[in-house]
Image (cartoon, coloured by chain):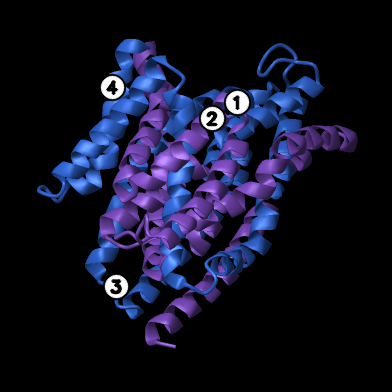
Amino acid sequence: MTDKELSYGSFIKEIILWGRITMLAAFVLSFLPALYLAVWHGVVPSFGLIISSVTTIVAIYFISFLAEPLLYYPILGISGSYMSWLAGNIFNLRVPVSIASQNCAGVKEGTPEGDIISTLGMGVSVFVNIIILTIVVLFGSSMFSVLPDKAMKAFDYILPALFGAFLFASTLRSYKIALFSVPIALVFTLFGLPGTAVLFICLISTIYFSFFAYKKGWVKILE
Amino acid sequence: MHYSAIANSPGMWLACAIVVLVIITQAFIFMKKAYTAGLQMGISRETMFKGMRAGLISSIGPSFAIAVTLLSLIMPLGSPFSWLRLSVIGSVPYELMAAKTAAQIYGVELGGVGYDINTLALAVWTATIAAGGWLIPSSILIPKYEMLRVKIVQGREELLPLLSVAALIAAFSSFSLPYIIKGGPSTVAAITGGVVMLLLLFLSTKVKWLREWALGLAMLAGMLAALPFI
């Protein structure tokens, strides 16, 4: 093993250890608000009510629980996954930041260098997101009340613009792969399948296609 | 006491701030370790700072988008809990779904007549417990996914970048198409964002600094272009 592989290997080991510790700590501590309501104010919903409302949510998100961490894995990598699944807001913040930081630093996704840069970029996004949310939650109502309603609605279109930007940019990486994935996504979206199902079908088939196309020499490993 | 007084009490802020500290700690530890490992691996300081600067610039727009939707959570869940759930673990649609389910069980509207401290408590318990569906499996399974990723390429490590690129092209195809075909301001925003992004990336071969700003500017352009159609 080279020095580089050794350093990256020990980095991964530490990330797994600290990823697990921080994730489980956050899950346990995330009960504090609920316990505060219970202990300080004596408000606890009955066990039966909690079960029935949790069951409803689990029924809705069951597929997402099982599939999403695996589906996003090839993009997020090992440390990116630990950060994203703890920090939340994955496809609307962490994934775009991960790709943007790797592109700007000039490293390839899916390589050890890519993973390091992605971790740094995503770490910064955690701080930026918390700072902006804190400002808005403290001063938001007065800050945004000066804006006309129409301007407030404009914020709804940041996300479509973000996704459009990434889709168009990805054609520069490999327009052939995009020529395959876009029609797949289009057809299944038109069928009215839920987002996670479309993502699942599109991702598996596109990965399969890209390997096949690579074997045939249609696509190259991209710079 | 009105539920919103309790939901916005200093005790609630304290309980939520402790959890936010965990994610800050994690981000700090991970960045420190990545920076040290990066230097050992021969990645230059300059490259790493470029990555961090890009992370900084490109997270501003999406964070504002999240912050604006956060305002819709404040009424039913209170400021501190909304702030916590969008800094750590959650997302707006998920938290809203948990709050709506809790309200439905009590037969009331979100924040409407009869929405009280009991409804709030049920929403808080629901959002907290169900999020374990993501946290618990991922904390255990993520290393297994890494083994799976290596297995998929059958030992040919040069295929790993192709796997990532294929995955991200597929992901953004699936994310963007619902908006592109929706019509109206969504379509205008997505197409404008895409065209501006491509233009800026072409320009950035001449003007280097544009590369980091391309995504932010494309988002802004898409948002502004959607304005007349709202």
Disc 4 marks a residue whose amino acid type is Leu
User: What mark, if any, has residue B224 been given in the picture?
Assistant: 4
Q: Which residue is mark 1?
A: A191
The chain holding disc 4 is B
User: What mark, if any, has residue B43 been given in the picture?
Assistant: 3
**Looking at the colours in the rendered structure, which chain would you say is drawn in blue?**
B
Q: Residues within 10 Å of mark 1 (few under 14, many from 20)?
A: few
- Quarter location, residue A106: bottom left
Q: Which residue is mark 2?
A: A187
Question: Is label 2 in a helix, a strand or a loop?
Answer: helix
* Label 3 and label 2 in one chain: no
User: Could you tell me how far apart the alpha carbons at marks 1 and 4 are, in whole angstroms?
Assistant: 31 Å
* Label 4 and label 3 in one chain: yes
Is the Cβ of the residue at disc 1 closer than 8 Å to that at disc 2? yes
Eye-nearest disc, 3 or 2: 2
Q: Colour of chain A?
A: purple
Among the two numbered marks 4 and 3 on one chain, the one whose residue lies closer to the N terminus? 3
- Image quadrant for the C terminus of chain B? top left
**Side of B79 relative to A54 (left or right):** left
Residue shown at 60% from the left, 25% from the top: A191
User: Could you tell me how far apart the alpha carbons at marks 3 and 2 are, in whole angstroms?
Assistant: 42 Å
Question: Is label 3 in a helix, a strand or a loop?
Answer: loop
Q: Residues within 10 Å of mark 4 (few under 14, many from 20)?
A: many
* Label 4 and label 2 in one chain: no
Eye-nearest disc, 3 or 1: 1
